[in-house]
Image: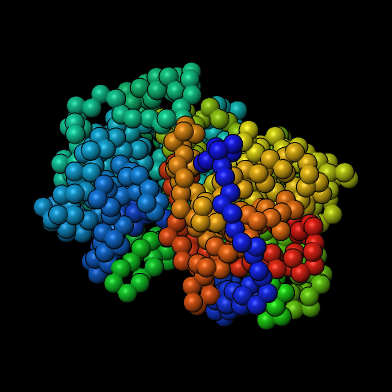
Amino acid sequence: MRDLAAATAAPARPFVGGAPLDAAIARGTAALLGRQRDDGHWAFDLEADATIPAEYVVLRRFLGRPDRGLEARIGVHLRRLQRPDGWSLFHAGAPDISASVKAYLALKWIGDDPDAPHMQAARAAILALGGAERSNVFTRSLLALLGQIPWRAVPVMPPEIMLLPRWFPFHLSKISYWARTVLVPLLVVNSRRPRSDEPCPDLSELFATPPEQVKRWPGGGHEAEPWATLFRGLDAALQRTQHRFPASRRQKAEAAAMRFVDERLNGEDGLGGIYPAMANALIMYRCLGVPDSDPRVVTAWKAVDGLVIEREDEALVQPCLSPVWDTALAAHALLETRDPQAEAAAAQGLRWLLPRQVTEVVGDWAVTRPGLRPGGWAFQYNNPHYPDLDDTAAVVLALDRARDRADAGDPAAIEAAIDRATEWVAGMQSRDGGWAAFDADNTAHHLNSIPFADHGALLDPPTADVTARCLGMLAQLGRLPANDRVARRGLRALLAMQEPDGSWFGRWGINYVYGTWSALSALNAVGTPHAAPPVRRAAEWLKANQNADGGWGEDGASYALNPADRPEAPSSASQTAWALLGLMAAGEAHDPAVDRGLEWLMAHQAPEGGWEEEAYTGTGFPRVFYLRYLGYAQIFPLWALARARELRRGNAGRVPHGL
């Protein structure tokens, strides 16, 4: 990102709203209304990099269920994502060794000729990156399963982990929900080491050093001492002893793993609602002798196949589905327009959301919060063991905005849902006053240094963006720091998370623009004066990082551990909208920087009313996995334009909402 002192704002003519702004909002509204499903909800496609589609091809071949027609269309998608230097984790990003290895593997298995130009280029790119031996742990686990590398290349995680007591330094409750659901079935798979139904093509050409000659396999750049050395020593001991554990203990551990998966299988929405966990569950069932005709296996396959998107001549696989998030955000944008048709559509979406509140299932979060009643919403259609704070706050904020509308649902039901959700959100506050996405006090940071955690995303600690969302929700409901201890602790935590340059880190959206918008929205909601230093520093940071064309942009490289490695990025619609929403929350609705940003959005609006966006602006795991929410560019620009019109019409100084 730019240096604040060096930034200069290009002069711009005063922005004129009126008819052009009204027309842009009308077109954006019509486009968003056109994407609403018949039952009232929104569900946009959710894309990632090449890894998930590639893994899906491998899964089908491994379990003896090839679909050559579908795989050919996935091949088209993989080739389209290929760059001269390999495959990247986000649009126009640097090449990534693990994504490139998996994409090459899938294409070779599909039948692409290794001597074809694109395969030669891919192979050269992988070798230039250091060879397949530089892949991350999950890729090496796959390669070991396919017989391409020795198992000593994979850190040992024995199934007996399932039997560890809570007081032990490592326990499933101490890692994130996504790590938990991915890891549990993988414990069984990596100890059983099943063979592929279909022989894997040889990949020896991808290694700069023959795998059997590699002495030390790579770890993560985030690892901290002395934990890294300690855990490497422990792994070396486990490598020698892992097959000497008592058989009865191993059987008990595997049974515990199966119970865990069975209980959370989640019907056709899948284990954890995420592809890697679903795929690992299928392989685990095969390892444990569960027949393909078993209802659990049949259901798990339906969940995996439900993530496939087919488009003309290509196909891809989504990492998960996002209907609750999409619907809540769409409702906010439409309510902002004050258009009667848009408000009615938002109300219909809220009616769809209302019965999806989780009030019966006590999920994994209760391990650290026993006795707390469930009351959240999940990200997916169904994922009752894993509701999240971000979705819950976004839904409640929208329900509260529309609670006086007769078409939003039964007023008593809305009131009860908001009260129940507020109880759950307040109860999920972590000890430091912040909020995480799925758990409370998931802060055993030493575990990010275990060899298996080379991605650095084993945990779910409190973050600025989720903390801001929950604080904004409480404030909109009247629970302010002056009169509420939970809000007071949340505000203190959020202010402590501000970066030295005035921004806030974005854990679930890319990146500092996302985090800063989120934080400014919450600070505005709790009544922080716009002249207060934290607000002013954040607003000045946003202005300093506006691109010369008037928009804002960041990409996945902004998560680099070294700030000097964080480059500038082209403007994108969703990030420009976040910056504008942040500036308006800071009292800057009439600032020239806002004028330029609004002009950028209007100039880049497509004729049909939406916005095109190739950028990946969502985050799965920083530095490892990014998301392209196709709904973001349809929702957030409309939201920003409509809010600007509303603030300028009434000459209002403060945004009246928590988001």
Closer-to-camera residue (478/498): 498
Look at the image and tell me whether residue 147 can be seen: no
Closer-to-camera residue (183/47): 47
Q: Position of residue 273 (x, y in %)?
A: 50, 57
Q: Please say if 18 is above or below 220.
A: below
Q: Position of residue 570 (x, y in %)?
A: 46, 53
Q: Residue at x 66, y 53 (%)?
A: 582
Q: Residue at x 29, y 61 (%)?
A: 80
Q: Residue at x 38, y 61 (%)?
A: 317
Look at the image and tell me whether residue 276 can be seen: yes
Closer-to-camera residue (239/307): 307
Q: Is residue 248 left or right of residue 458?
A: left
Q: Residue at x 61, y 47 (%)?
A: 542
Q: Please say if 264 is above or below 382.
A: above
Which quadrant of the figure contains the C terminus? bottom right
Q: Position of residue 36 (x, y in %)?
A: 57, 76
Q: Position of residue 92 (x, y in %)?
A: 37, 51
Residue 346: quarter of image: bottom right
